Amino acid sequence: MPAPLILASTSPYRRALLERLGRPFQVVAPGVDEGLIAGESPAARSARLALAKARAVSSAHPDAWVLGSDQVADCDGRILEKPGNAERCRAQLALCSGRSATFFTAAVLARGQSATVSQHVDRTVVRFRLLSAEEIDSYVKRDRPYDCAGGFRCEGLGIALFEGIDASDPTALIGLPMIWVAGALRQAGLDPLAQPQS
């Protein structure tokens, strides 16, 4: 029997993405401090936190494969956090209006405390339209994306905010780079396309 798979995340978006593969997994909250480190780049921060989450859960479940992930967004040198409320959401979208935001989505598949099998950082650039205050307000009221980095849901009405998306993996913007995840699972002997045991 293959080792169990654990998603080290409380994100409902990552959980829904991993469910697409049809392979059973558990969800365990990693309980990692996600504080900033001075001078750390967005890409490095996402990689550090994804690894920390995977290792935190691996320490309690050493026989399982653990998938950790983190996403950090940047617009003109400013980190775009999860806004948490409508006011901060509108402010973030106003900042992004007519600009590009870059999303770094890191993922780590690990087993045991130090045995990192694979690590990846996906880069997605979102090009925003020039948005009016009325458009921003209407969007925020309708989609209420307060728990999303950048203050939008690309899989929802947020797609109407964009001029374009430059990406190699469309799922990375939602929170988990599933093309890479599927490949990492294959290498770990958890091939999503393998025939289930009868």
Image (spheres, rainbow, N blue to C red):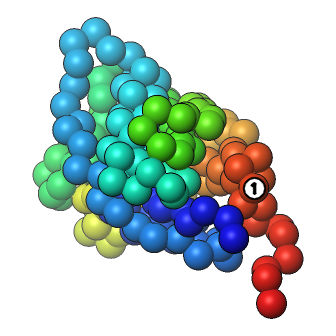
Tell me the crowding category of disc 1: few under 14, some 14 to 19, or many 20 or more residues within 10 angstroms, Cα based: few
The residue tagged 1 is 189
Can residue 142 be seen here? The reply is yes
Residue pictured at 23% horizontal, 18% vertical: 37
Q: Amino acid at mark 1?
A: Gly
Quadrant for the N terminus, please: bottom right
Q: Is residue 101 visible?
A: no
Query: x and y percent of residue 40 in the render?
Result: 32, 15
Q: Is residue 190 left or right of residue 150?
A: right
Identify which residue is drawn at 30% across, 29% down: 79
Task: Please tell me how many numbered marks the rendered image carries.
Answer: 1
Specify the quadrant of the image occupied by residue 180: top right
Q: Which percent across, then down, holds residue 90? A: 23, 49
Tell me if 115 is positioned left or right of 13 in this view.
right
For the view shown, which residue lies furthest in the bottom direction? 198
Relative depth, front residue between 135 and 29: 29
Figure check: 33 above or below 11: above
Q: Is residue 48 above or below residue 184?
A: above
Residue shown at 65% from the left, 50% from the top: 181
Residue 47, x across and y down, in percent: 45, 29
> x%, y% of residue 145?
32, 61
From the viewer's perspective, tell me whether residue 41 is left or right of residue 179: left
Which residue is found at the position 80% from the left and 90% from the top?
198
Q: Is residue 187 left or right of residue 108?
A: right
> Looking at the picture, does residue 123 appear above or below residue 65?
above
Secondary structure beneath disc 1?
loop
Residue nearer the viewer, 126 or 97:
126
Question: Dividing the picture into quarters, in which one does residue 4 lie?
Answer: bottom right
